[in-house]
Amino acid sequence: MKVFCGRANPTTGSVEWLEEDEHYDYHQEIARSSYADMLHDKDRVFKPMADAAVKIVEKNGFSDKIKIINKHSTEVTMGPDGDMPCRANILITELFDTELIGEGALPSYEHAHRHLVQENCEAVPHRATVYAQLVESRRMWSWNKLFPIPVHTSCGEQVIVPPLELERCPGAPSVYDIQLNQVSSADFTVLSDVLPMFSVDFSKQVSSSAACHSRQFEPVASGRAQVVLSWWDIEMDPEGKIKCSMAPFWAHSDPEELQWRDHWMQCVYFLPQEEPVVQGSSISLVAHHDDYCVWYSLQRTSPEKDRRVYPARPVCDCQAHLLWNRPRFGEINDQDRTDQYIQALRTVLKPDSVCLCVSDGSLLSLLAHHLGAEQVFTVESSAASYRLMKKIFKANHLEDKINIIEKRPELLTSADLEGKKISLLLGEPFFTTSLLPWHNLYFWYVRTAVDQHLGPGAVVMPQTASLHAVVVEFRDLWRIRSPCGDCEGFDVHIMDDMIKRALDFRESKEAEPHPLWEYPCRCLSEPQQILTFDFRQPVPPHLIHAEGSIELRRPGRSHGAVLWMEYHLTPDNTINTGLLKSAEDKGDCCWNPHCKQAVYFFTMADPRAPLGGPQTVSYTVDFHPHTGDITMDFSLSDTLDDGQ
């Protein structure tokens, strides 16, 4: 049976209705679940429990001892005719996310103790503790606030300043979960020791009510308190002999045995405002939480003396945190990147230039104005981006200098542009709907749609774009696609087969986005240009096809191909969203930290198998102009010596 599915196409900007198999959602959910990653986590399924389970299963059978109840735990009924005949005396759960409580652990435990388990039951895990560490970090703070941006012009230095409303905004309520082990120690200054903030004993009644926990400490260094790094550990047994810790390497009890995880990482929280702290001068860090969310604040006096109302969960009221995600904040604050656009704009701007800027919540229009454009129009297709840009223009006294149009760019009319022809069409390009690197090719469709508004000899910037690929060996990310086989003695081949069938349904032929600065890998090949796109011309009606091979130059296990876009602003200026520099002898990769790259995993196989001989990767890649999709297929083959 076939069903029609509505899909917003991020590349073309249109809404499409596609015919899909009725099980499409099911296969997609399984394929993208990363269940295998969890079973590769040796700390989650600890050996004593696994050994006991195997012996019990072997001695007593399986199906007559384990009953599967296909319900949410809050819907389970109790009694002779219910799902469970009586209350349980052991509660075994896994309800945690990186933030510990973000998946509803507290209300689920609260309900279980009230309705499903006996008083004084034992719980596995037994207890969880949340830890925090206060730091100063310009890099991480740049993920939360807009910094002043200097622009050197012929009339001297101009500075783009953030609106006061953005400066005072407490930020977004959501945690930023990252692989903290990949943040260089040079990127932050530790201001406190690791502080245990609060614990939850799962064997006792748990409350989901809002609460706060204060920890007084003396800063170990003076600085500006900006960011709280946080993680948790769990004790599986009442004695705390079996632990599972999410601590980063510098706070881990045994860094050499650090377990890699992608399902549980570490948390970055931003204080509502940065505050100065002095080494040795006592201060309190306060952890607040409701039933699903954690946030932090600083207190200057002890909790006993401070009777003020604890701050509510932070809510963005400046629009910026609703429009820009954390990497986007970092991208806008990247002065080197901004300088590339400034350099490119200097080569294409003329005193009589009429500019049209097309990117979501972009500062390109301000750069164009400061660098001498006669008139600047900018298009914002969402109400949030329109309101934000109005505030930024007003803070910089440009509300009468830059024309902002709230409309989808494809719908622009000559009246919107005051009857003028555009001489310079600008884009970063960046669009909030983009998930994969090539989704920002929406700029090409916009360029095609506004072709009638371009004057003779109009310049388009970027002029062209190119899609690049490199074959890599991941240190750890391969685990999310690797079959498990046996997990602590349990045969889980059925799950492996289920995931493989779901992948074969479609996902195995598609790439998925990952911020690869968080996931170390080695380049096994040199980067290779796959496709090019000429923005100086409208989108062509015909398919753009490429096929070829990539030679592997370094030994290693080929886990997949990484793809990214490069935007050529001018012949001498390129914005690279992927591999920032050529790999060194060992092939270690350095990725753009503001962008997600696309990973095409090769066929699921044992990534730990012995290394083979030299190999090549063959590929076919097609850009479909009518849909904006890029389809691809990569295949791995051995390279045989002559005569073999």
Image (cartoon, grey):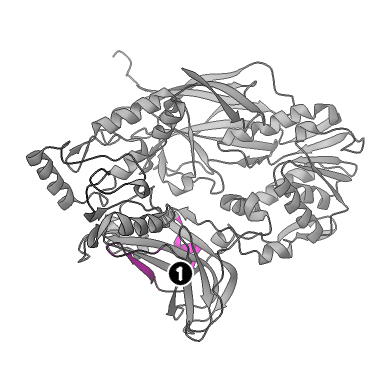
Residue type at mark 1 is: Ala
Q: Is residue 526 visible?
A: no
Residue at far right of view: 419
The magenta stretch spans which residues? 183-207
Q: Is residue 358 visible?
A: yes
Residue 283 position in % (x across, y down): 49, 81
- Res 413 → quadrant: top right
Which residue carries the number 1 mark?
211
Task: Check the picture and name the quadrant holding the C terminus.
Answer: top left
Q: Please, which residue is most extreme toward the bottom here?
A: 305
Q: Number of numbered discs present?
A: 1
Which residue lies at the image location 39% right of the left edge and 28% below the top edge? 503
Location of residue 353 with respect to 237 vertically, above or below: above
In percent of width and height, residue 269 lies at 51, 62
Residue 154, image x, y percentages: 84, 55
Left or right: residue 221 versus residue 9 is left
Examine the structure image and report whether residue 204 is included in the region drawn in magenta.
Answer: yes
Please tell me which residue is depicted at 48% across the width and 78% down the height of the picture: 284
Position above or below: 263 against 119? above
Q: Mark 1: few, some, or many residues within 10 Å (few <14, many ≥20)? A: few
Q: Is residue 219 left or right of residue 353?
A: left
Could you say which is closer to the camera, residue 542 or residue 235? Answer: 235
> x%, y% of residue 422?
85, 35
The image quadrant of residue 398 is bottom right
Q: Residue furthest top?
A: 643
Height in image: 286 above or below 507? below
